[in-house]
Image (spheres, helix red, strand yellow):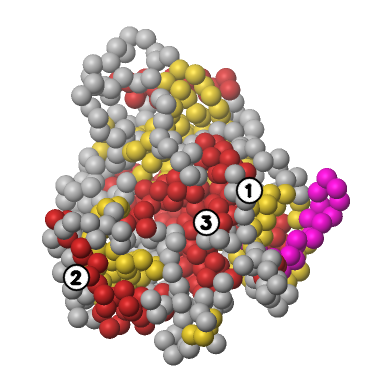
């Protein structure tokens, strides 16, 4: 335990620099694993104003809601598929990777970044394992064999904090990344956006209970040669985003933030009102029963103008330091929202550091954070470049290509997918394909389906309810839904599987599901704490369970286990 005679406090704790979404999620995810953390931030512990990054995938939203301990209940607005309108004509929705009528995109939620940060900050203050140091700026980093020391200047002068690991989540201008000399190459100022949070009650048919759909307007009458994105948020809020012409000149900064506030026309307040009214009139007119004689009544809650950049750090792990969030990557928001990526970083690193700190897994497990998360960010950067050729064409060739794409927008296939680059990411190979922690098989490396399961105590739950604590082994057993309580615990393979899992040096849970897509009876699925499918063992391969589970936590089968510690 931390602080006992047998342990050194610095070997059992993690220092996290930065109190944005990545840093707050990291300390809370580590605390949930029983790891004490120290949070260092230059701010005063208040959430930043505005929705900013506001879109989360369903798995990421569930992770954030779990961290916040109920403080995000009802805070996410479920979204339907993205709708696209070119000029004044709706583009048919592309729903499946095979152009079928079935929806292809994963469920997504609209959630204001300000609301998210406030919920996580409130949870941090209520978590004893988290010590927060506000108004402290990092001035130096010193790495040791088994620890890392941070020098930070605060209201009472310079302090030193020592921990086993350091998570640098201090944004695109990361002082930690610079102190370590990690390069952050990429393209600055690739796009310019004007964002606004608008409170407006747009009419909907009383019988329509389907999720509200976000809209992408391409070359609309009120924004020629540009795009406008309208995203619904809870409580009648809408996040509106306009693409603006880039300012003239060459970017001088080699290290630029993902969203740098800029000033001046064409995003000045005198034009913002006109922009907002034009979008709201269009959204209102989509309801045939709406009264469009007058402009919708709205409140302009927040506005911000930003420049967008695409960058990727050379390394996500440097010794005992891990980079996360904007400190590690900047991606165009048409492909991935910064907060969604940041929360995924935190979820990936938390369970790995917890196992390493407890000496239940070797340090090489931490290295897989670099491989998995950097590959995921690099893939989105590539899609971001392709999106920029369409949304912000430069030169004759790109402009002609954009025109041809839009001319074919009534068809299906790649043409429509370029209008919504997120579908390209969703349809690509599994996120972590090629990771050394995985055992090859169907769907391995992708987020596991959130199927209903029965737990050891007989309680029924969703698979997502079992995550972030340890490995989850899922047995596919058709007909289990008609069994009473815990009868299944001693049926069939269950005693053997429980005995094998008891041999593992890491926490694990055995659950049963009546069905899993494309899985036959007695298939075993190994799911990582972060929800990714690590192995798919067909019937009759249960003898490989231990080897597979050890591989999932970065261990080799030949490594002996003495008191739960690798030799």
Q: Nearer the viewer, residue 32 or 384?
A: 32
User: Which circle's residue, 2 or 3, is located before the other in the chain?
Assistant: 3
Q: Residues within 10 Å of mark 1 (few under 14, many from 20)?
A: many
Q: Under tag 2, what secondary structure?
A: loop
Depth order, front residue of 449/401: 449
Q: Nearer the viewer, residue 287 or 118?
A: 118
**Quadrant in the picture for the C terminus:** bottom right
Residue 145: image location, x then y, percent: 70, 78
Circle 1 residue:
19
Q: Which residue is mark 3?
A: 32
Q: Nearer the viewer, mark 1 or mark 3?
A: 3
Please tell me whether mark 3 sits on a helix, a strand or a loop.
helix
Q: Name the dominant secondary structure of the magenta segment.
A: strand
Separation of residues labelled 2 and 3 (CA atoms) = 32 Å
The CA distance from mark 1 to mark 3 is: 17 Å
Residue that mark 2 sits on: 491
The residue that appears at 18% across and 56% down in the rendered structure is 484
Magenta region, residue range: 147-168
Name the residue at 49% across, 19% down.
299
The residue drawn where x is 24% and y is 81% is 541
Can you say whether 156 is above or below 144 in the image? above
From the top left corner, tell me how far across and down residue 203 is, in percent.
Answer: 31, 19
Dot 1: element = loop
């Amino acid at each position: 335990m931390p602080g006992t005679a047998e342990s050194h406090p610095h070997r059992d704790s993690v220092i996290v620099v930065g109190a944005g979404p990545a840093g707050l999620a990291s300390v809370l995810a580590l605390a949930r694993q029983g790891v004490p953390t120290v949070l260092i931030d230059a701010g005063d512990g208040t959430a930043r104003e505005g929705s900013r990054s506001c879109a989360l995938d369903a798995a990421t939203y569930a992770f954030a809601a779990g961290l916040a301990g109920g403080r995000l209940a009802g805070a996410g607005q479920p979204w339907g598929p993205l709708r696209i309108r070119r000029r004044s004509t709706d583009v048919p929705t592309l729903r499946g990777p095979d152009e079928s009528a079935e929806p292809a995109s994963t469920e997504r939620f609209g959630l204001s970044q300000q609301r998210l940060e406030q919920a996580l900050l409130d949870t941090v203050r209520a978590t004893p394992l988290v010590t927060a140091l506000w108004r402290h700026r990092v001035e130096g980093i010193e790495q040791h064999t088994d620890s890392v020391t941070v020098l930070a200047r605060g209201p009472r002068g310079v302090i030193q904090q020592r921990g086993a690991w350091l998570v640098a989540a201090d944004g695109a201008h990361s002082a930690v990344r610079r102190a370590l000399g990690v390069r952050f190459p990429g393209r600055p100022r690739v796009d310019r956006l004007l964002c606004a949070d608008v409170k407006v009650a747009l009419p909907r048919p009383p019988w329509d209970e389907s999720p509200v759909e976000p809209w992408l307007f391409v070359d609309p009458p009120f924004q020629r040669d540009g795009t406008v994105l309208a995203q619904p948020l809870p409580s009648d809020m809408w996040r509106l985003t306009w693409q603006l012409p880039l300012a003239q000149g060459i970017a001088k900064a080699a290290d630029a933030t993902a969203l740098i506030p800029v000033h001046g026309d064409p995003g000045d307040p005198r034009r913002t009102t006109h922009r907002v009214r034009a979008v709201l009139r269009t959204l209102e007119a989509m309801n045939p029963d709406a009264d469009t004689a007058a402009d919708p009544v709205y409140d302009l809650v927040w506005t911000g103008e930003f420049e967008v950049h695409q960058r990727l750090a050379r390394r996500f792990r440097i010794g005992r330091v891990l980079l996360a969030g904007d400190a590690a990557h900047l991606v165009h928001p048409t492909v991935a929202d910064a907060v969604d990526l940041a929360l995924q970083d935190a979820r990936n690193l938390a369970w790995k550091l917890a196992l390493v700190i407890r000496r239940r897994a070797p340090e090489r497990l931490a290295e897989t954070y670099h491989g998995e998360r950097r590959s995921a960010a690099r893939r989105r950067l590539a899609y971001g470049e392709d999106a920029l050729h369409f949304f912000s064409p430069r030169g004759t060739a790109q402009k002609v290509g954009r025109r041809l794409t839009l001319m074919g927008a009534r068809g299906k296939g790649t043409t429509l997918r370029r209008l919504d680059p997120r579908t390209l990411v969703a349809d690509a190979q599994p996120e972590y394909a090629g990771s050394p922690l995985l055992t090859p098989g169907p769907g391995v490396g992708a987020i596991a389906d959130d199927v209903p399961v029965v737990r050891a105590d007989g309680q029924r739950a969703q698979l997502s309810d079992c995550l972030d604590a340890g490995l989850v082994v899922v047995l596919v057993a058709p007909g289990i839904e008609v069994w009473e309580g815990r009868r299944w615990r001693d049926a069939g393979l269950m005693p053997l599987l429980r005995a094998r899992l008891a041999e593992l040096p890491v926490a694990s849970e055995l659950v049963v599901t009546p069905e899993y897509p494309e899985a036959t009876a007695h298939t075993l699925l190994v799911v990582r704490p972060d929800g990714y499918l690590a192995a798919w063992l067909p019937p009759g391969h249960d003898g490989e369970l231990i080897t597979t589970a050890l591989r999932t936590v970065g261990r080799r089968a030949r490594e002996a286990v003495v008191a739960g510690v690798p030799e």
